[in-house]
Image (cartoon, rainbow, N blue to C red):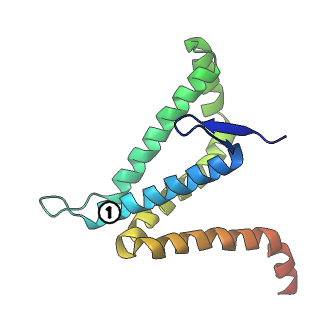
């Protein structure tokens, strides 16, 4: 069964997977272009913002969006929301997930630095190559390890 979605403004019916793919490509392209522009355009006093500040603020913003999502998931009841947060945040799995979360923060800082020194197109292709290498490693990593 193909799930379709009608774009309200254009009154066009598209498959949801293609619409989502287009939306993610558009979002990623706009993100890279705006990040690049903001990094190469200094402010009036000649200073450029700290990439770590941008990364931390983005993570805080995502955290609050997640809190709102959990609140609506619990039927907008404060007691259920607080109990669910307490159960999830003070759990051992949360501590285990903090390590990849910290590495993700370091990665985002490095991406800002890379975008400051590379053209947007070169950055985008380089960043997409990391996904290709990851896919190859996940798919064939065990087989390659046995050969070596």
| Residue 92 showing in the rendered view | no
Compared with 23, 144 (above or below) is below
How packed is label 1: few (under 14 Cα within 10 Å), some, or many (20 or more)?
some
Between residue 131 and residue 53, name the one nearer to us. 131
Residue 9 position in % (x across, y down): 52, 36
Q: Residue at x 64, y 67 (%)?
A: 131
Residue 18 position in % (x across, y down): 67, 51
Residue 102 position in % (x across, y down): 53, 54
Q: Is residue 109 left or right of residue 141?
A: left
Between residue 70 and residue 3, name the one nearer to us. 3
List the single residue furthest toward the front: 11
Compared with 23, 141 (above or below) is below
List the single residue furthest toward the left: 45
Q: Residue at x 50, y 52 (%)?
A: 27
Compared with 35, 7 (above or below) is above
Q: Residue at x 34, y 52 (%)?
A: 53
Q: Quadrant of residue 2?
A: top right
**Residue, disc 1:** 37
Compared with 87, 145 (above or below) is below
Q: Is residue 103 left or right of residue 61?
A: right
Residue 100 position in % (x across, y down): 60, 54
Q: Quadrant of residue 80?
A: top right
SS of the residue under disc 1: helix
Q: Quadrant of the C terminus?
A: bottom right
List the single residue furthest toward the bottom: 148
Q: Residue at x 71, y 45 (%)?
A: 15
Q: Quadrant of the N terminus?
A: top right
Between residue 72 and residue 146, name the one nearer to us. 72
| Residue 67 showing in the rendered view | yes
């Amino acid at each position: 069964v193909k799930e379709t979605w009608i774009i309200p403004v254009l009154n066009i019916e598209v498959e949801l997977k293609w619409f989502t793919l287009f939306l993610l490509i558009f979002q990623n392209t706009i993100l890279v272009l705006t990040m690049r522009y903001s990094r190469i355009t200094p402010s009036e006093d000649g200073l450029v913002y700290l990439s770590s500040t941008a990364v931390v603020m983005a993570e805080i913003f995502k955290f609050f969006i997640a809190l709102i999502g959990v609140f609506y998931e619990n039927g907008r009841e404060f007691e259920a929301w607080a109990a669910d947060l307490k159960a999830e945040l003070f759990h051992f799995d949360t501590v285990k997930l903090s390590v990849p979360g910290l590495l993700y923060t370091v990665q985002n800082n490095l991406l800002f630095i890379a975008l400051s020194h590379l053209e947007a197109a070169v950055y985008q292709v380089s960043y997409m190559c990391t996904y290709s290498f990851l896919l190859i490693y996940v798919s064939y990593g065990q087989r390659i390890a046995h050969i070596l």
